[in-house]
Image: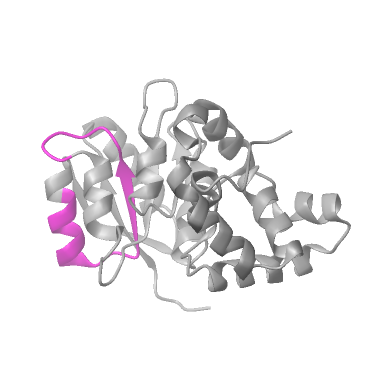
Amino acid sequence: MTDTPIRVLICEDQALVRAGYITIFSAQPDMEVVGEAADGRAAVEAARLLRPDVIVMDIRMPIVDGIEATRRLAGPGTETPAKVLVVTTFNVDEYVYEALKAGASGFLLKDAPPAELVNGVRTIARGDSLLAPAVTRTLIGHFAERLRPSDTSRPARDEIVRTLTRRELEVLEQIANGLSNAEIAERLFITAETVKTYVSRILAKLDLRDRVQAVVLAYRVGLASGPD
């Protein structure tokens, strides 16, 4: 454990919300707010200048939206991808799935309690993804049409089936269905530590950064069909 605080950049166009985030994070002994931005273009510039450990990113912002800003900072081909926590509202935002594809390490709802927001930043800072099972289930239901695989996804699906073992495929499906490690362990009659090992192997074999990317991939190629 290091004494160096987690450096956080706040990207949010609403001044009151931005001030609230700053207050919450600044009150944490292990966090430091290093900057803020009110639009997506400023967010990208600030992130490249300040090199924060975690970027808290709103989706709906002027000039450049949060999805495009996330793509520029963490998307495919990015030399040193940033760690982005997207904070959004499901009932007004139609873009969560695109944010995940753009490279976000996770997301939370805007009405999440402060403790959950703080824990989310810590989770992403240590290199884990933040994809709460309950939120995953909501995502799957909300984007069912968009997540449906196309005919062109079959080759990628076949390659994954050849790459992963039968048990790893089972674990991948449960991850995509929004189950936590403990829930997967209970369903597959194995230990949570064993599940964690399987998850690490899946990410390594498929060259995925985190659990979020595993969920997106599983749905894009048709390896998961949604929670029971």
The residue at 71%/68% (across/down) is 165
The residue at 52%/36% (across/down) is 113
The residue at 28%/51% (across/down) is 70
Q: In the image, which residues are magenta?
A: 43-64
**What color scheme is it?**
one colour
| Image spot of residue 131 (x, y percent) | 54, 48
Q: Quadrant of the C terminus?
A: top right
Q: Residue furthest bottom?
A: 2
| Image spot of residue 25 (x, y percent) | 39, 51
Residue 190 in magenta? no
Residue 48 in magenta? yes
- Residue 18 lies, with reference to residue 43, above or below; the image says above
The residue at 49%/56% (across/down) is 155
| Image spot of residue 86 (x, y percent) | 38, 44
- Residue 104 lies, with reference to residue 51, above or below; the image says above
| Image spot of residue 205 (x, y percent) | 56, 72
Q: How many marks are shown on the rendered structure?
A: 0
Left or right? Give the position of 88 relative to 197.
Answer: left
Left or right? Give the position of 56 relative to 170.
Answer: left
Left or right? Give the position of 226 relative to 118.
Answer: right
